[in-house]
Amino acid sequence: MKKLSVLLIMVVILFTALSLPAAAADYTIDDFSMQLSLPDNYLIYTRNMTGSEPVFQKYNLTKAQIDDWFNQSNAYFLAYNQELTQSFYIEITEDIDTRDIFNLNYCDEQKLAEILKFGQRELALESESLSLVNSSMYGTATIPYFYYEFIFHEGMEDSPLLNYSTYYNGRSFDFYFINYDGEITAEQSQLLQNIINSVKFSVTLDKPQDTSINKQYSIKELGLNLDLNDAFDVRLSDGTDDNGFLTAVAIDGTPGFITLEAWEDERSRQIFSFANLPEAELKTFAEDFTVASLQTNKVYDDYQIYTSPEINFVSFWYYSKKDDGELVRVQEIYTVYNGKVFRIIYCGMEGGLDWAHSNMLVNMVKSFDLPAAQKAPPAA
């Protein structure tokens, strides 16, 4: 959902440069029609500096160096106190996730909770230099935010880091506050909250109509019909190659692929159908499945149970270790129906998952049209 690997770069810039105090407390980022207010004793860097400001000559820096940091980090605004013990900066990004979510104001409570849970899942394991401490929802009068507390493990001592994140007009806006000199005090936390409360957007766009198409595919060997977004190039198989019946490769510029496997074994014949299991038993199954998988190269961190009148399934999230040692983020959806196992996997090839493709995967499974549910045969 978000990338924080540029923090170390920010620290280097922070301690090699100073700017002059800003004359005003109100600022506008024109490219995104966004305004905010900061205390007028904060020191500011922005993208619209000309390079002729005294800060560049005094500290032997060039505008190109500052712009390079902004571009590497997707940052548009950097501020810090005069003692160089605190910094505040804004990252703004646009990708398949931000275009899919578009604006948190357009999300109902259930979707907000799902996105927050997805973000918790990704952030908890994203970086060895960060530890996720807490997360929650926060809302101003006009803008909902996801709120995160981190510990940043760089340098001689750990540093606390706060983040407010929102989606607006198809982009993500991340507001970061980091303290290099001990814990963040209640006063500092309130200062950041005041900044967040001051954020306004002068332009609010309607989400563009979704022009993608859900195509239906039929796998006759399974009696299965399913829908999948045309963001994937789909290949169907007959199951003779490692029980594989479908492979779908993302063609929207995001490296990732979906596979569908199905088979029958002794355990699936015993369970027969997840549709027959109450949610409590599904939870027990999911927890047992996770524990049993600790003997593999998969590191599981969470699961979610989905139920419907026709089919119940469990979605797992985990890291899978490749032969070269690289960890790849994977989502696996697992169900048993009429004595047969169905396993659907989405693998993000650059280490992470994204909300948009994960949502497509869940919608694909929810679209499953299978032969009518049967009763389990009597035990022999």
Image (spheres, grey):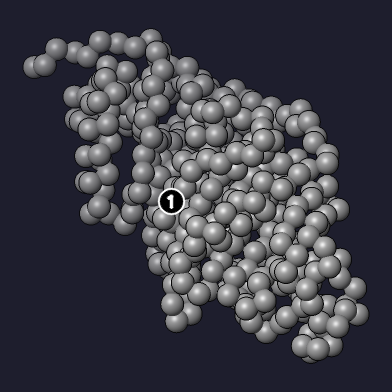
- Where is the C terminus found, in terms of image quarters? top left
Label 1: few (<14), some (14–19) or many (≥20) C-alpha neighbours in 10 Å: few
Which residue is labeled 1 in the image? 134
Disc 1 marks a residue whose amino acid type is Asn
Whether residue 51 is visible: yes
Whether residue 126 is visible: no
Q: In this view, does 267 lie above or below 186?
A: above
How many numbered dots are placed on residues in this image?
1
Q: Is residue 87 above or below residue 30?
A: below
Question: Which one is nearer the viewer's eye here, 254 or 243?
Answer: 254
Looking at the image, residue 306 sits to the left or right of residue 376; the answer is: right
Regarding mark 1 in the picture, which secondary structure is present there?
Answer: strand
Q: Residue at x 26, y 48 (%)?
A: 293
Q: Residue 249 location in percent, x, y?
A: 58, 44
Q: Residue 181 location in percent, x, y?
A: 50, 75
Q: Residue at x 32, y 18 (%)?
A: 275
Q: Residue 281 location in percent, x, y?
A: 23, 26
Q: Is residue 113 above or below residue 58?
A: above
Q: In this view, does 115 lie above or below 2?
A: above
Q: Residue at x 71, y 82 (%)?
A: 17
Q: Residue at x 11, y 16 (%)?
A: 379
Question: Which one is nearer the viewer's eye here, 180 or 114?
Answer: 180
Q: Residue 82 location in percent, x, y?
A: 67, 76
Looking at the image, residue 284 sits to the left or right of residue 319; the answer is: left
Question: Which one is nearer the viewer's eye here, 368 or 138?
Answer: 138
Looking at the image, residue 108 sits to the left or right of residue 288; the answer is: right
Question: Which one is nearer the viewer's eye here, 11 or 100?
Answer: 11
